[in-house]
Amino acid sequence: MSNLSLRFLETPPLARGLRLNVTTPLAEVRSLSVNETALVLVFDAFRDGRGFSLASALRAGGFEGQLIAAGAVLPDQARHLARSGFDAVELPAGADLETWTRLLATFDVPMQAAERGATPAWNRRGNIARPGLDEIAATLNARYAEADPLTLIRAVLTPAWGLKVATLSSFGAEASVVLDFVARVDPALPVLFLDTGQHFLQTLSYRKHLSAHLGLTDVRIILPDAADRAVKDPKDDLWLSDPDACCDLRKVAPLGRASAPFDVLITGRKRHHKGDRASLPMAEVIAGTLRLNPLAAWSTADVAGHVARRNLPAHPLVDQGYASIGCWPCTRPSVDASDIRSGRWAESSKRECGIHLPRSSRVTAA
């Protein structure tokens, strides 16, 4: 039986909250929802799937208020409404509450991952439930603290766990190392690249060159939402007035949407980057996704030695003194040889873009 939860609101009265039609563009919904505690998404037709997509995208972007479905919805959509992130349904006049309740609890074998609900069929192995991500992270940290990156990456791909895994890469100064290990394990593993629209041209060129060198076959270019960008940063200068909001628009929110299908993101973060990374574990859960950091314990010497042994191509800006490379407006050559990230947001106290921080520690995607 299903363990999904969905409240049924019989009308009248109408549900309380900001009412928006499901045809409203996602960027506009995000903007309007910033200070709202409840949204009512109104369906004009039961065939219109945009309401389900809106709900899922809002949840992935960090919206924690009430989501209520209204309008032309059917009882046999109850489970999908709940799994997409809705909390309640404003029942049409004359609706049969018993039918809605029965269809919500009909079965518990979904075929796809969703914001809420049971484990998908492809994640099940007989009658043995997959451990939770926190438990898996604890297992990886306990068993593989001294393991080499190849062993750790292979471990997270254990078939019994059934995890959907991708790699997150900036194609920056040290990116070649973790991508080399990923390519040796599975060159078809998805690699997510956040194309902020503010990258150095050298980074875009390096992405193509390194991908071809390693034989990566599924590099996915993740872009900011165009409508959102047009509203919030029409002149491409948001970084001047609010770098946190710029990072949220161009990196945090796009990653939230792109990473939703995945259980695990492999990163190239290391403890020698200092700051919040100084105590970096091998595995941690951030915003509902397990982050695997197979190079956490590596030093600058380890990185340089691996690059030399494997004859990996270097980012063109490394020779110009860039030890850590992000967007061009906020990246300078390193100003402190002992701090690899000292050229990032060098004239401010900012040290992280936010993609590796819990939602409560960053700007919430609007």
Image: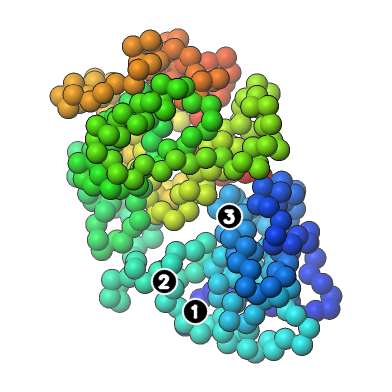
The residue at which mark 1 appears reads as 2
Quadrant of residue 317 in the image?
top left
The residue at which mark 3 appears reads as 57
The foreground one among 3 and 171 is 171
The residue depicted at 26 percent of the width and 23 percent of the height is 313
Q: Could you tell whether 279 is left or right of 14 in the image?
A: left
Q: Tell me how far mark 3 sits from mark 2, CA to CA.
A: 19 Å
Q: Secondary structure at mark 3?
A: helix
The foreground one among 125 and 58 is 58
**Which of labels 1 and 2 is toward the front?**
2
Are dots 3 and 2 in contact, CB under 8 Å? Answer: no
The residue depicted at 41 percent of the width and 21 percent of the height is 202
Q: Could you tell whether 300 is left or right of 260 in the image?
A: left
Q: Position of residue 124 (x, y in %)?
A: 33, 70
Q: Disc 3 residue type?
A: Ala
Q: Please determine whether, in this image, residue 107 is positioned above or below residue 196.
A: below
